[in-house]
Amino acid sequence: MRTYAGHSTARDSNALYRKNLEKGQTGLSVAFDLPTQTGYDPDHELSRGEVGKVGVSIAHKGDMHTLLDGIPLNEMNTSMTINATAAWLLALYMTVAEENGVDRQVLQGTTQNDIIKEFLSRGTYAFPPGPSMRLIADMIAFTVDEVPKWNPINICSYHLQEAGATPAQEVAFSLSTAQAVLDQARERVDDETFPRVFGRMSFFVNAGIRFVEEHAKLRAMGRLWEELGRKRYGVTDEKMLRFRYGVQVNSLGLTESQPENNVIRIVLEALAVTMGRNARARALQLPAWNEALGLPRPWDQQWSLRIQQILAYETDLLDYPDIFEGSTVMDGLVDELAEAARAEMAIVAEHGGAVEAVDYMKTQLVESHRERVRRIESGDLKVIGQNVYTTSEPSPLQQGEDGGILTVDPTVEQGQIEAVREWRSQRDQAAVDAALEKLAQAARDESQNIMPPTLEAAAAGATTGEWAQALRDVFGEYRAPTGVQDAAAADDGTLADLREEVERVSEALGRRVKILVGKPGLDGHSNGAEQIAVRARDAGMDVVYQGIRLTPSEIARTAADEGVHVVGLSILSGSHRELIPSVLSELKEAGADVPVVVGGIIPRADEEALIEAGIARVYTPKDFEISRIMGDIVGLVAEHHGVGAAAA
Amino acid sequence: MSDGAELGRRLREGDRSAAPAALNLIETRTPDGRAQAAALLAEVSPAALGGEAPVHLVGITGPPGAGKSTLLSALVKEWRARDRTVAVLAVDPSSKRSGGSLLGDRARIEHDARDDGILIRSTAAGTMLGGLAPPTREAAQALAAGFDVVVVETVGVGQSETDVADLCDTVAVVVQPGSGDVLQFLKAGIMEVPDVLVVTKADLEQIALRARRDLAAALRAIGARNTPVVAVSAVPPPSGIGELVEALDAHRATVDVAASRTRARRMAALAEFTLERGESAVRALGGRRAAEALLVGRDPGLPVSALVQVLEEAGQ
């Protein structure tokens, strides 16, 4: 039982961890900020507004020492949500343990390390797919003997569901990813060790609101996993073949309107992964009821922890053997899902495996998500409080002074910038340079393992940004596919009025309405931006969408050079207060006089400030009707150019 | 509405900040927009410039997935290292029933957004199946006054490649190893012989080497033994990019620029006339060849807009 936590500085996070351990939490789950996840130091241009935002900033081993101060690492099970820079953070963790006299052999925990889903959904990648997979294989080969209790990778189907995956896609894409990792790892270890490598693979799964089907999904996954182990890899040891997984239940379905209902959703989703003993999660973490509003506070997280404790200690959930054994309904569901997943896995294999199929999978996810959004808009999919039963009494939960969410102290970033500069000036520079040079050599030479030089760099005091830059220099930069290019055109009649208006305004302007959809900063959650881009295209606009991770100056330059009529920005990481004003001033400087709209998780208090700063409209998760947003945007363009609104 | 003549003058003086507004104007199909665009084009015509613009107009085309964007990333970098300013017109083929399109090329061309010596503009191919839309031709001619290199990037072989050849000084066709189509098209004469053939993914070594050999043989077989075939790799460490720039330059040195640009303006005028008045108006002039003949013999320094005028007067 644990909650996913970490914020601002290492010192504050350390205090939070100690408090949570006192409340009965049994492990650590570390959330890092986006610069740490993507390999940038706090003083890098792209880190602006993101330092300490969605997690803790760890720039070097000094920060890691502070983070873990006074926590008994020999007893701790530590889960780190870290992917592109997983090798580096594990090295920092190991270095701190060893400098505190804890042997690496006893360290227990997990690095998430599933890069494919970063390309598909979450966006915190740093290197191209090939080298990224090699880093993962290196970590697996290194930890299997050196840190034997560590789970070097946790394949995530979680984020695929968040990106819109159907249950069959979730199963198929994550198992295909596991297969790609295992194929690569097999070349790095001997045949005798390989079954242990297979046995150390674990999964991080999602559970949605259709909790009966979701339970069947987990049973299907277990069955397919065993099948993969036996057939493809010749693993026979029953213990190694067990499907091990942890869960964070669904956030996609949590609503901004009537957010108190989310607690009920979370409980039901937790049931999906605990009901049947044969497919029960080994670790469970629950989101907070107010995630769609902003950052949860400690009290909100405590509430989520209590849900788990009530399920475990008050109910009889854990008292029985598997309650679905012999159920023909459940078995039928499992058969159906396993069959659909096998078919989907075959398509991924035809593309050459998960790495080669990133484009294909991304496009499928964008399609599935579009279908989901369409069903919510049309009312086919009912979401209580959002598209049905929307009248509500005022919620006392949101009446406090903080509006029911946590705000991060804006001075954290400046403090971290000064601290990392101070750190760089205090260390033995020659030792750092030598270690980074060794690292670059190992990166160039595929026969070497990246872990030993990474550990050396960590011990010498290199920074997160320096480690990642050394590898970027060798591996090159990379931009993941956006998946929108091949999204099929919507052909239902619902867009007719909207298209008509886009045509009318385009003709009045003399050229087609052109929109830039931009994602400033390091936030990789691109679902919203993708759906907006595809819908704008379907409405008849020319759409410039460049994917994630753009600086304000890049966005402004694009807006000016492309001659767009309107700019739409999407931010979910909470950095809108820093980044949006800076995009506005860069636009002004670039000479782009266009209306700007913003979408994302924007607390109500910030909404007014953004409007004040010159933003034309702010959209939050409660605005689920994308076509209505499009109508707004066309109206803004018409107004801006004095070509009037439609007669309606 | 922006002042076309003013924008044209600023472009001529190398004021980069005038380029986006100039392109907006050229794309604008209202009567006022067309008039301002004509004024703009007059300011960057050979008559106003005192000769043809010293720009190198380069067409980059090839089948989807051949690696054009990755190649362009490396080429733009190389040109900038040689201190040449570059404008890229990326023509996106995606265009759906709705009339809208997703312009994704810009994202794939890696470039420094803070560098004023680079301009990238995406345009939808619109209703022009395969071919180049008239605004793209005019845009290339306007940018020619303000940049050292103007690239027109299109997808596919066939009509778009022919149109690009009409517009540009040098056309490079990009193919990846193992794509037999281009080889077949060349042999069958479906595709015109490009000025430079580029084989990407040279890091695949043996395969790329074989592709290069096969293409050279095919070119020899159709009597085009002088067409250079350059193998490039854009993945780090890049290779062949400098060689490619030199091959493009070498071709440019052999081109009769005045004749080629004059013809380009005639073709642009014809395309614009066809878009505005329709195929029937072209037939009323006696067909494409007759219409073209009407333009031959006019002052070669005339801008496209003036040539369109000639066709319109003949049609009345």
Image (cartoon, coloured by chain):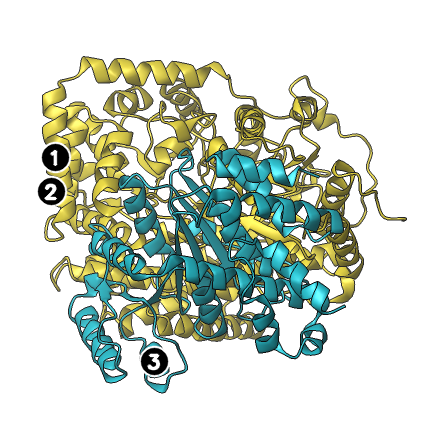
Name the residue located 26 percent from the left edge and 35 percent from the top edge.
Answer: A469
Q: Chain of mark 2?
A: A
- Between residue B203 and residue A486, name the one nearer to us: B203
Name the residue located 58 percent from the left edge and 42 percent from the top edge.
Answer: B22
Name the residue located 10 percent from the left edge and 37 percent from the top edge.
Answer: A438
Where residue B275 appears, as percent x and y from the top left, is: 66, 65
Task: Say which of marks 3 and 1 sits in front.
Answer: 3
Among the chains pictured, the one given yellow colouring is A
User: In the rendered picture, chain B carries what hue?
Assistant: cyan
User: Which element type, helix, strand or loop, lies under badge 1?
Assistant: helix
**Given the image, on which type of amino acid does mark 3 rest?**
Leu
In 3D space, how far apart are the residues under numbered discs 2 and 1 (Cα atoms)? 6 Å
Where residue A108 appears, as percent x and y from the top left, is: 26, 39
Q: Is residue B70 visible?
A: yes
**Given the image, on which type of amino acid does mark 2 rest?**
Gln
**Given the image, on which type of amino acid does mark 1 rest?**
Glu
Residue indicated by mark 1? A437
Lateral position of residue A275 relative to residue A144, left or right: right
Question: Is the residue marked by circle 2 packed among few (<14), some (14-19), or many (20+) residues within 10 Å?
Answer: some
Q: For residue A292, what is the image quadrant?
A: top right
